[in-house]
Every structure is written in C-alpha cells, then in structure tokens.
Amino acid sequence: MIYARCLLCVVLMVVPRMLVAAEYFQIQVVDKESRRGIPLVELETVNQILHVTDSNGIAAINEPGLMNQEVYFFVRSHGYEYPADGFGYQGKNIKVTPGGKTVLEMKRVNLAERLYRITGQGIYRDSLLTDVAVPLTQPVLNGKVLGSDSVVNAKFHNRVYWFWGDTNKPGYPLGNFSVPGAVSDLPDQGGLPVEQGINLNYFLDENGFAKKTCDMPGPGPTWIDGLVTLQDKQGNERLFAKYVKIKGLLTTYERGLVEFNEKQKTFEKREVFDFNAPLYPEGHPVKYRMDDQDYILFGQAAPLIRVPANPDALADLKQYETYSYLKPNAAAAADWTVDRDEGGALRYQWRKNVPPLTSELEKKLIQQNKLSKQERYFLMRDIETNDRVEIQNSSVAWNEYRGKWTMIGLQKFGTSVLGEIWYSEAASPLGPWKWGRKIVTHDKYSFYNPKQHPLFAREKGRLIYFEGTYTAMFSGNEVKTPRYDYNQIMYQLDLSDPRLAAELFEK
C-alpha cells in the first residue's frame, strides 16, 4: 500500500509536466563541435516574435496561429554562426508541432564556449516547459533576483562566497543597491561540477529577496571590489573588501575597507580611506609571493598595486606600493617625472605615493614627450593583426597547465565598446602582457568586468572558467535581450586549443 501511494505521488508529479511539454515544440541549438546546448541563441520569426534559448540551449515554442505550420526562424548568437542560404538569410524553416522537437547546429567563432547563465530569472525556463532535466535546485527564480551587475567572489571557510553590484527584483524597478550575496559549495565538496552550473544560496531578507550585505551610510549605492580572504595573527580566516559610495553619474565620493561578519551575513566598516590617497585595493586581487614575503596584488587593467598579505597592512594605505617608473612627490599630479637609469631606460620599482599606471596616464606622458609609444607598459597587441589592444579591466590567475600567469581582459573600445574579451599570459602577474587573442565577441552589446575563476579550473588548468556581466549598458543598443540582460554568464576556455599555443605568446 505504501509503495502504491509513493508510485501514485510520482505519477501525479510527472504527468502534469508531460502534459505541459506536449503543448510545446522544442528547438535545441547545439555547438557543432562540443554538442553542448548553446545559451543565448536568438530565434526570431518573420513577424519578429523572439525566442531566446535557455542554459540548455532550448527554446520552447507555443505560439497560437503558428503551430502546425512551416515557420522560418532567423538564428543568431554572439560569437556563433549559422549557415546562410542563397539570399544571405541565416535561419531555418521548421515544421512546428505540439510535442515535436528539432536540433540546430551552430559553428562557434568564439574560442571560449558559452556554458550557462549564473544569475537571473528563467535560467532553465524552456527546459522545464519541455520536460528536460536541469542541474540547478532553483532553475527559474532564486532569491527573487532578476539581474545582477559585476561579480566578486572568494573562497572563505572552505566555501565560495559571491557578491554582486546593483540587483533587480520582480516587484519594483528599484532593487538592491547595497551588495547582495550568496554562498555555494566547491565542486569537489558537494557543489555541482563547474561545467554544469552554480547552485547559489542567497542571503535573504524578510521578503525572500537577496538582502543588502553592505549597506554603508550615505546617499547612493554601495559597491565593493577587491574581495580577499586573509589570515590574521591567530590563524583565523577573515574576508575583506573595499567599498565605495556612489552618487550622480558613477561618481565615487567615499571609499574604505569592510569585513564580512559570517554570522550576520553582512559587511562591517573597518576603515574610511583617505580619499586623496593614490593607492588602495581595487579590482580582482591576486596572491603573490616576492622578496620572501606574501603580498596581495590589486589593479584594474593589470595588478600593479601590492600590499603585505595581512589584515593590518590591508587597512593601512601607507603600506601600499605600485610597480612604476614614476617618481613620487611630484609638485603637481599632472606633472609626473619619469625615472630613468644612466642608460635612459625606464626604472621600474615598487613605489609609494604615486598612482598606478594606466593607459590614460601614459597617453599624457607621451603628449608631454616624457615617454615614447614603444616604452608604454600597456603594449598588448593582437597576435593575428599586430594591432594594439587596450585593456579596460582584467582578472589574473596562476595557471599550472601553462606554467604562466593568465589574464582574462576586457577590451576598451573594441568592435563593441565594452564587449570584447581577450586572453593573454605572462611569466609574472606584473607582465609584460605582450600578446593577446580575442576569445569572446559581442555584436553591439557589453560584457564587462570579467572574473576568472581559478577555484574551478580543471585538468590542472587546461580548462579555465570566467564570467562577465552581459548588458546593453554602455553599448548603444536599446534592444535588451529578455531574461539575459544585466546578468552573469559563464564561459569555458580550453588552453589546449592550437589557436592558443604557448609559442604564440612568446614572440
């Protein structure tokens, strides 16, 4: 009797899904090479009805008036190609029937393979509608999060802690502007294999929405970066980040240091930094040992700022240095002196009281005839064309497979303004980053603030993983991709690809 009741329960759960699935036509779009479903493929009818594949590469079609019809779908996706017919149309004529299915193949142009969406609503919507298995415990709405900006994460107490920027919710256009957060298990300790997804457990408020974890006083949003785990003198792990307060059009008016309280699931203010100090934590940190001491490296385009790897030093801006050829204590910030040795070569040293090198600063030095174009630190070039590539921000990590430091960098003013992602490698996290190859492209869409995940690297780093924020913001594109816009997307890069051969980066 108990067995019969259990069997009946299973049948009652399964039958409704089967009935729903019978109403939909399933289109799955797969990578021609890997055979994996491709997320973010747009399937548009002749009369502009748009379907976008979910993280299984599936689109569920149930359009009154178009069922049991031959329907033409234009097929397009950033970094992927579909064959064109004699008129140049890239698409497919498909007989759409309830309960039917078909598979389309696309050629991947990107070197990196798009895996899945990490945040937002409807990650596996179409899979559920067509009764396809999904890996996530909350596949359609998690923490009531519709979209989140720019991720930072770190391993802390043997789990992965994640935090984001401004975050949207279903109930109102204004959501969480004070850093939502979540935790996940490592893949080898109960978490999903990284190639399948990330089961995020959000810290929730009383309404079930992702709570504010860093609600610092003052008008405007609170953002964090420079998230880093350090040990104190007693051997305790502690999690820190730099916070900023924002007003108006992205204007920072305060910055400081916060520490995460694991019991309360909130950050607590530890220090307000001197706003005029030139050096402070920023970007995605890198742990690095030099001169018989452990340091944390920070930076945006490259990790050129260092501080001893302990909580006291992290809070003390006087201990921060940057790897630079600029002399400190200039009479005016606009009149920096370039330090050279007796032979006229730039003298790089760890220096205090000077700003980190940036492309903009080097452009000014060139205009002032203090620096030649060939002497710039930021000299990355495209392996294929030899054209210069200007990096906006990056994420750097040690890679065992290559025996090098790897950079995943966002290009500034590429073929899309902030949508092109590049790979580079160097013997040191300080560079020089001489050569790069584009690994992800977007058509008039942004994919900014890339974050490399060395925690998830597989096969000793042959397979590396990174994500970024997919958004129409700053792109000039007013057409936002439903469900995907303003969310995080994960990619996989295979470093054994011959187009990424090590010798190409050693020219």
Image: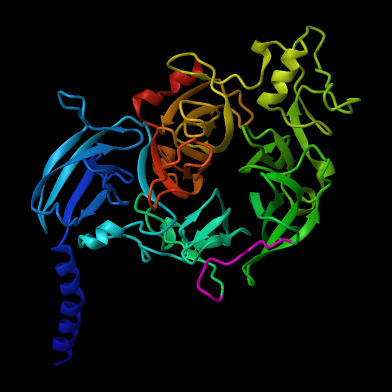
- Residue 407 visible here: no
Looking at the image, residue 105 lies above or below residue 482: above
Q: Which residue occupies the extreme bottom position in the image? A: 1
| Vertical position of residue 52 compared to residue 141: above or below | above
Question: Left or right of 396: which side holds 319?
Answer: right
Instruction: Give the x, y percent position of residue 230.
Output: 68, 54
Which residue does the image show at 50% across and 15% down from the upper left?
Answer: 387
Q: What kind of secondary structure does the magenta stretch mostly adopt?
A: loop
Say if 394 sits above or below 189 in the image.
above
Q: Nearer the viewer, residue 378 or 149?
A: 149
What colour scheme governs how the chains and residues are painted in the rendered image of this protein?
A: rainbow
Residue closer to the observer: 316 or 125: 125
Q: Which residues are magenta?
A: 206-216
- Residue 156 location, x and y as percent? 58, 59
Residue 1 picture location, percent across and down:
14, 93
Tell me where residue 350 sits by quadrant: top right
Q: Is residue 207 magenta?
A: yes
Say if the magenta span includes residue 256: no
Q: Is residue 86 visible?
A: yes
Residue at x-position 63% and y-position 64%? 213
On the picture, is 16 further left or further right than 448? left
Q: Position of residue 425 (x, y in %)?
A: 52, 28
Q: How many marks?
A: 0
